[in-house]
Amino acid sequence: MSDENELLIEQIQIGPMQNFTYVVGSRSTREVALVDPAWDIDDLVRHLDEKGYTLKAALVTHYHPDHIGGGFGGGGRSIAGLPELLAKRPVKIYAHNDEADGVRKVTGVSESDIQRVRSGDKLAIGAIEVEFLHTPGHTPGSQCFRIKNTLVSGDTLFINSCGRVDLPGSDVEQMYQSLQRLSALPDDTLLLPGHNYADVPNATMAETKQQNPYLRIQDLATFREVML
């Protein structure tokens, strides 16, 4: 199988907030990871079984409950996510070191369930390699996953916008710097965002830079005015 065809990736819209969960892995080995598994864990696990995939890891972009499950705000609402997944498929959760405590607090998973990673670390899933990129701003430990020429960006970068910076742990300067780093990726990089907030579910980085006004801001002062 050629290198281009080895990457297996599926974009699944799930839940009432237009979240995307991703299946990423190796076509030849059928080994996969789930990115931001939440909302309907039973359906996600059933999908893996029907496709004959072996789950090897859960990858976390950030700790907000609509991406990983757990308590949501002050209303007592709880979303299915990592604890329910681990009950069915006990795999490691890969979270950035600056986000791991938040993941534990929101979901109740234990420290032993989490593999803390830093920017530049890599994970092999079958015959493909995932690179972890720390992109703080939306949360302190937000991270993206780069797999070949594909970027799973969570709530850092959307096709037409970027993540909020008015939430606990957000930082407008870090978000600006993270967006600058991501905009420097090759134009043919395929952007796979954390929510279906645009008229298309994914786009190349070249297309994103053309239509995303936040990537066209050239200085922090202007970015701060726009975001805050």
Image: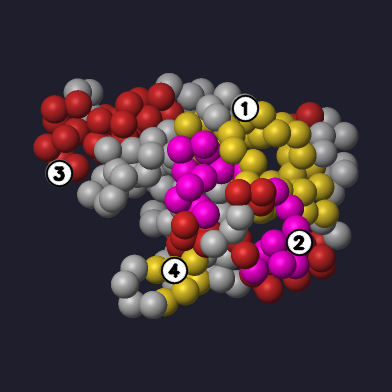
CB under 8 Å between discs 1 and 3: no
User: Which of the two discs, 3 and 4, sits closer to the camera?
Assistant: 4
Question: Residue 126, percent across and down?
Answer: 82, 39
* Quarter of the image where the C terminus is located: top left
**Quick check: 159 above or below 67?**
above
Badge 4 density bin: few <14, some 14–19, many ≥20, Cα 10 Å: some
- Amino acid at the residue labelled 2: Arg
- Amino acid at the residue labelled 3: Leu
Sequence order check, earlier mark of 2 and 3? 2
Q: Quadrant of residue 116?
A: top right
- Which residue sits at x=58%, y=24%? 120
Q: Which residues are magenta?
A: 84-104
Badge 1 density bin: few <14, some 14–19, many ≥20, Cα 10 Å: few
Mark 2 to mark 3 CA distance (whole Å): 41 Å
Q: Which mark is residue 71?
A: 4
Q: Is residue 91 part of the magenta span, yes or no?
A: yes
Question: Residue 91, percent across and down?
Answer: 73, 53
Please tell me whether mark 3 sits on a helix, a strand or a loop: loop
Side of 74 relative to 30 (left or right): left
- Which residue sits at x=19%, y=26%? 220
Q: Which mark is residue 121?
A: 1
Mark 1 to mark 4 CA distance (whole Å): 29 Å
Sequence order check, earlier mark of 1 and 4? 4
Please tell me whether mark 2 sits on a helix, a strand or a loop: loop
Which residue is denoted by mark 3 in the rendering? 228
- Amino acid at the residue labelled 1: Asp
- Viewer-proximal residue among 92 and 25: 92
Which residue is denoted by mark 2 in the rendering? 89
**Quick check: 87 above or below 197?**
below
